Amino acid sequence: MSEDIVKLKGSTFGIQLVFDRKVDFSVVKDDIRKKLESGSKFFKRGTVISIEPGILTQSEEDELRKLFHQHAVLFRVEKIESPRIPKRAIMNKSPQPNSDDAYKRARTDNAGQLIKKPSEEQKMMVINRTVRGGQEINSTGSILVIGNVNPGAQIIAGGSIDVRGVCRGLVHAGAYGDSTAFIIADKLMPTQIRIADRIAQPPEDAESPTGAEKASIQNGRIIIETVER
Amino acid sequence: MSEVIVITSGKGGVGKTTTTANLGVGLAIRGKKVALIDTDTGLRNLDLLLGLERRIVYTLVDVVQKRVGYGQALVRHKKYTDLFLLPTSQVADKTAIDPQEMLTIVQAMRNEFDYILIDCPAGIEQGFQTAVIGADWAIVVTMPEIAAVRDADKIIGKLQSENKNIKLVVNRIRPQMVKDGTMLDMTSIDDILSVDCIGQIPDDEKVVDSANRGIPVVEWKNSAAGSAYRDVVSRVLGEDVPFKPFETEGFFTRLKHVFGH
């Protein structure tokens, strides 16, 4: 039975991918594809599927990630036993004086609820298109954009933001105070980056990045570093 | 069955009306029965570009207010007998035409024409809604400059949320500037907008001349813009026409200018 090749173990922190290591990778991949196409309940848009590190090679991981993304499922390689529980250090700080309305609205509406449910940013909103100028995407959880974020567009997330494309708009991760939130894009060239209560503006003469980059807060400042993916 | 196309841009002055006029005349030359509807109420220009201003008796506003049927308001082109213009009022404003009323008129006209082209006003307010509602698909006109591309992006977002198919026309390209790197090239435009392009129109002084005369450049044999518009017409008709490379000013042409030839 093909059911036995790939198993999905549910846990409080998402769904874990488990399979017999002796089976050929192409068979595993095929089985996952079948499961995805069958419309199984496990694979709702935005579901997070994780796998323990060290089981697959980098290129195999990338292949699976691509496959899952086509079905708007998020694929992560991480230790399942030790989920990252985000700190909320800046929660009590006063809001940025020049922050926009959406920021304030979201912050006050959701602050109470967020404390009760620490796994809020495990939730992932998936946007399967290019976000164009004048459009705004808001979520209390994290946001995955499979497409570009064009100049004039706004992405505001309580959690992190992942852009599988070129990010040229305004991105705000950790909009309710989570300073561990981060922003990743294939090409990170936004008009402005905001994480929690920090704002960064790329230099006027910034050159176009060659690979994926990640923005996060380190020592109280937004820094940008290249990442592999 | 007819195709209803809206020509829109967001930003003003990029060449919506010029494109509508050229496309209309071009399709008529190719033997299609065409109606052009001007929805830029209060700031109408399409009649001027077609040289039809003096023939207008009734307008779209009269049709909406049921004073006349659309047939009575249609103005036939003097040269191409299968080309008609439904002009709008120069006195009323955009609130005179409700989107639903516009939809009714377009639906009624569908049986009679091969193509109905709707010239959209600039902006994203009611005038835009009125122009877009009855259209099967849209041509977004933009220019190789940052403000026009941004506005086109915004308009494309709006059209996509209404599930309209979109094609792009890039107007007023200056090949020499693109070559020198001082003007946005097609790659940078496509990078942002990423919609199918069906027209690359070079900047051409003859367009100004043609507007004054009321004879669209698509009829002009020696106009670069006219030739590019003829290609757009072919692509609208579903033909696969390659994009011609632009002529930039080479050494010899410049030399000719110097010697006054």
Image (cartoon, coloured by chain):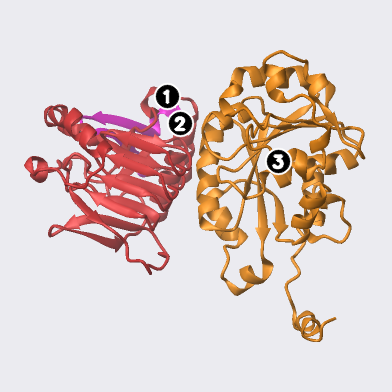
Image mark 3: chain:
B
For this rendering, which residue is in front, A23 or B135?
B135
Q: Is residue B95 above or below residue A167?
A: above
Mark 2 or 3, which is nearer the eye?
Answer: 3
In the rendered structure, which amino acid carries the disc numbered 2? Leu
Mark 2, residues whose alpha carbon is within 10 Å: few (<14), some, or many (≥20)? Answer: some
Query: Residue shown at 62%/50% (left/top)?
Result: B14
At x 23%, y 49%, the residue is: A195
Query: In the shown orientation, is residue A13 left or right of residue B249?
Result: left
**Label 1: few (<14), some or many (≥20) within 10 Å?**
few
- 3 and 1 marks in contact (CB < 8 Å): no
Q: Which chain is red?
A: A
Residue A36 numbered mark, or none:
2
Residue behind mark 1 = A40
Please give the residue where the numbered disc 3 appears in the rendered image. B45
Q: Which residues are magenta?
A: A1-21
